[in-house]
């Protein structure tokens, strides 16, 4: 009997789409064969070398490159994506059947993370197409700032106008700062009613914007000790009691709750992971939704149907094991043209699709919907009855709070209906919520060890994600159109370096914990190929050592008159040439398939080298110093920038200079400057030698100097071209003279060492 494909009850809510990857596989295998050929050539010709140091270093570096290429191939071998159908969901599932969701928005600094950005994220989430009584929004303020609390109160008032307006007219962009841009205007065919409401809402948003801006410029005072702001009097952001305020409940809006967990200088607060665990515990007592969405403060909901897309996956999979968490892509708005800093993640598309085809995407710390029971440490095959949970066992895992343990028992046993039927108002649960938000609550429990977001790495997201996968859960990448969330990417070079360094530190730290992916494969349920994918990302920091060695080899060989590549008149010269040519054409082909411009491709290529030899190198060194007990890693908040959309002229000059590299006195760029100076010195050295030779003998002299080495040195020089321009620029666009002088001394020391290895004529 034929199935009516038009019947929505017969069609899937979600569909896994497998992409053809045969061409890419063939090219990757060709590159791998050349890499292996180069290693074999080096092994067989090692004994014939006059200077074994460059040959040995090249062999070690190329062995590492081959290893990382194999990891990359394993990840990208299969490609898939997920398509969801919310229109079918609405026809098949009643709204009252939708699962409740607790929304976590985290912020840590009102200066580095402007309040207006955070409030727009809040507004976009309050206005999504989902039953308001199924949502609760928690804002975690790790700075204990009265400004953030004030902004949230005022934003909630504005939301009572904004949310109905969005739903009445089906507004697609529900973050006001993106909807009311400086060039947004009404159309002639818009109804008079819409035009009137549009102007009214815009004026109200303008007022909200100005209130927050004025409050940000005015110091907070404690004039009225009886006001809601009295709890913020005489507090320090690193030493204060827990503050929980229910701003909105039982209205047409979702619950809106402000949280600033307790902090004490004697207790480690575990950065973002600690804030997430406090959110999980407080929300467990107040609303205890079975699903939890966490977003960074700058990641606004770009697709109002984001929760409907998620429900397609939740209801579409019969087995919960296939959906431990749902990850939405990280994407950005108003990114700089051609991605000059290489930080917009455009080059990770095929890697992401490859990881999604194994055990599922990594947890990226934002834009992710978790099952609460998974965060509570449940494994796929665990069957728990709430009546069989021993009190002492529950207390050891979740702590002394009776309300938290009772809530956790219902979640773990799957008693969702009992949770939804609770009639207790969040405002009546503030006292027990404050108890679980205390800085000492976690002691003697499994929070941060087996339950919640795990401690031990500054990239708590990846550490928590690998633990979830190791228990046997899979994850799903959901990429609706339009994209579910959009955020702001670092728009200055120093902030991009800070972000990359923090990632390199946190990812490498994971390999030195009991959550090492290889151990989890042997002892847990982490798939082997997925473990390789985790190794690919966790080894970012370690890549800096072979890369910086390989970038130094051309200069070393030119100065010393040695070689690390086959001579141009040898048959083996075709091997490195082929690797270089095929790899770059392949990456360019991948980029053009994604609609990436040629300039963007080049920026991604060169910044891949620059970032590895600067930020990732310092990340690697930081972890090594930590392991030796000489230092501690610190979580550095990435600065987020907000541009005014009101045409006030502010930022016009900055827009003209957008994409220009800026520098500070941080030593992170110093290795890159040294590499640039060393290769410049080598090239000048080589050119001076060629200038002394008769033109008829230039080719012979080029072969003697090393054609491959000269080309590689030029390539490195081009990768660091922006640093060279920084030598001659002034102000923030110029590299500080102290950095240049220190780098120059290190470069001279390197050249001096090279000359000591020069063979006597």
Image: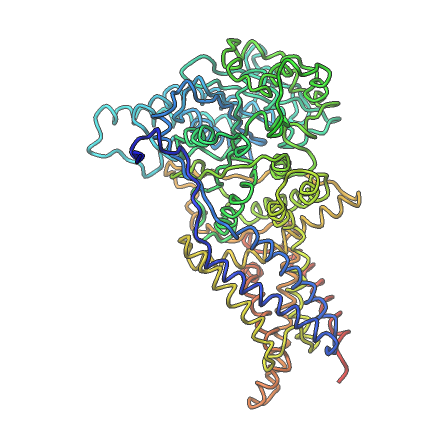
Residue that appears at 38% across and 20% down: 94
Q: Return the x and y of residue 397 as percentages of the image width and height.
A: 70, 22
Q: Quadrant of residue 388?
A: top right
User: What is the count of numbered marks?
Assistant: 0
Image: 415 above or below 72: above
Farthest left residue?
189
Residue 276 seen from this side: no
Left or right of residue 595, residue 299 in this image: right
Q: Quadrant of residue 597?
A: bottom left
Image: 89 above or below 112: above
Farthest right residue?
629
Q: Nearer the viewer, residue 386 or 227?
A: 386
Q: Return the x and y of residue 399 as percentages of the image width and height.
A: 70, 19
Q: Return the x and y of residue 611 as percentages of the image width and height.
A: 59, 53
Query: Image quadrant for the N terminus?
Result: top left
Image: 286 above or below 333: above
Q: How is the protein colored in the picture?
A: rainbow
Query: Image quadrant for the C terminus?
Result: bottom right
Q: Nearer the viewer, residue 80 or 628?
A: 80
Left or right of residue 452, residue 659 in this image: left
Q: Nearer the viewer, residue 553 or 309?
A: 309
Q: Return the x and y of residue 534 as percentages of the image width and height.
A: 62, 45
Q: Quadrant of residue 525?
A: top right
């Amino acid at each position: 009997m034929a199935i009516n494909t038009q019947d929505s009850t017969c069609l899937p809510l979600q569909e896994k789409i497998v992409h053809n990857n045969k061409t890419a596989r063939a090219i990757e295998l060709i590159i791998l064969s050349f890499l292996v050929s180069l290693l074999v050539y080096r092994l067989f010709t090692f004994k014939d070398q006059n200077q074994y140091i460059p040959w040995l270093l090249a062999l070690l570096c190329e062995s590492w490159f081959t290893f990382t290429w194999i990891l990359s191939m394993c990840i990208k071998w299969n490609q898939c994506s997920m398509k969801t159908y919310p229109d079918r969901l609405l026809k098949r599932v009643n709204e009252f059947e939708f699962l409740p969701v607790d929304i976590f928005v985290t912020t840590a600094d009102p200066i580095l993370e402007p309040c207006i950005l955070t409030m727009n994220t809040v507004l976009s989430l309050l206005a999504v197409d989902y039953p308001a009584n199924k949502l609760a929004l928690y804002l975690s303020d790790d700075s204990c700032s009265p400004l953030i609390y004030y902004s949230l109160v005022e934003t909630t008032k504005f939301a009572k106008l904004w949310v109905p307006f969005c739903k009445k007219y089906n507004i697609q962009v529900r973050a006001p700062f993106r909807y009311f841009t400086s060039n947004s205007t009404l159309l002639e065919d818009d109804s008079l009613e819409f035009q009137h409401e549009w102007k009214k809402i815009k004026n109200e948003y303008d007022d909200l914007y100005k209130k927050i801006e004025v409050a940000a410029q005015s110091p907070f005072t404690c004039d009225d000790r009886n006001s809601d702001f009295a709890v913020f009097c005489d507090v320090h952001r690193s030493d204060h009691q827990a503050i929980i305020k229910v701003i909105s409940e039982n209205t047409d809006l979702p619950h809106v709750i402000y949280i600033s967990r307790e902090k004490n200088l004697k207790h480690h607060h575990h950065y973002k992971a600690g804030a997430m665990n406090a959110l999980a515990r407080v929300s467990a007592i107040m609303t205890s939704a079975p699903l939890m969405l966490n977003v960074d403060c700058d990641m606004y909901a770009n697709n109002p149907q984001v929760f409907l897309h998620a429900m397609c996956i939740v209801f579409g999979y019969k087995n919960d094991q296939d959906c431990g968490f749902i990850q939405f892509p990280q994407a950005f708005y108003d990114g700089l043209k051609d991605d000059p800093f290489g930080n917009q993640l455009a080059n990770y598309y095929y890697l992401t699709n490859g990881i999604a085809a194994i055990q599922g995407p990594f947890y990226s710390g934002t834009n992710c919907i978790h099952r609460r029971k998974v965060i509570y440490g449940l494994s796929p095959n665990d069957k728990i009855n709430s009546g069989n949970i021993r009190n002492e066992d529950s207390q050891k895992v979740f702590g002394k709070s009776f309300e938290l343990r009772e809530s956790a028992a219902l979640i773990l046993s799957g008693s969702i209906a009992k949770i939804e039927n609770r009639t207790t108002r969040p405002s009546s649960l503030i006292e027990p919520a404050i108890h679980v938000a205390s800085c000492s609550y976690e002691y003697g429990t499994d929070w941060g060890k087996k339950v919640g977001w795990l401690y031990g790495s500054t990239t708590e997201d990846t550490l928590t994600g690998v633990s979830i996968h190791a228990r046997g859960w899979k994850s799903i990448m959901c990429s609706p159109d339009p994209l579910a969330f959009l955020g702001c990417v670092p728009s200055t070079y120093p902030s991009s370096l800070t972000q990359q360094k923090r990632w390199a530190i946190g990812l490498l730290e994971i390999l030195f914990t009991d959550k090492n992916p290889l151990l989890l494969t042997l002892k847990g349920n982490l798939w082997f190929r997925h473990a390789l994918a985790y190794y690919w990302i966790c080894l970012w920091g370690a890549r800096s050592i072979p890369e910086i060695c390989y970038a130094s080899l051309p200069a070393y060989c030119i100065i010393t008159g040695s070689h690390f590549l086959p001579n141009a008149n040898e048959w083996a010269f075709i091997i490195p040439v082929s690797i270089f040519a095929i790899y770059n054409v392949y990456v360019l082909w991948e980029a053009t398939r994604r609609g990436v411009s040629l300039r963007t491709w080049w920026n991604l290529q060169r910044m891949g080298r620059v970032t590895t030899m600067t930020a990732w190198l310092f990340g690697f060194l930081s972890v090594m110093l930590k392991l030796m007990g000489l230092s501690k890693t610190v979580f550095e908040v990435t600065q987020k920038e907000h541009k005014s959309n009101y045409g006030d002229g502010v930022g016009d000059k900055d827009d003209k200079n957008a994409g220009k590299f800026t520098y500070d006195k941080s030593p992170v760029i110093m290795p890159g400057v040294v590499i640039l100076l060393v290769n410049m010195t080598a090239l000048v050295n080589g050119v001076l030698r060629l200038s002394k030779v008769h033109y008829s003998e230039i080719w012979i002299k080029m072969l003697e100097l090393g054609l491959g080495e000269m080309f590689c040195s030029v390539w490195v020089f081009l990768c660091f071209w922006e640093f060279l321009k920084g030598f001659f620029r002034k102000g923030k666009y110029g590299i500080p003279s102290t950095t240049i002088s220190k780098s120059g001394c290190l470069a001279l020391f390197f050249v001096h060492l090279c000359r000591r290895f020069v063979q006597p004529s």
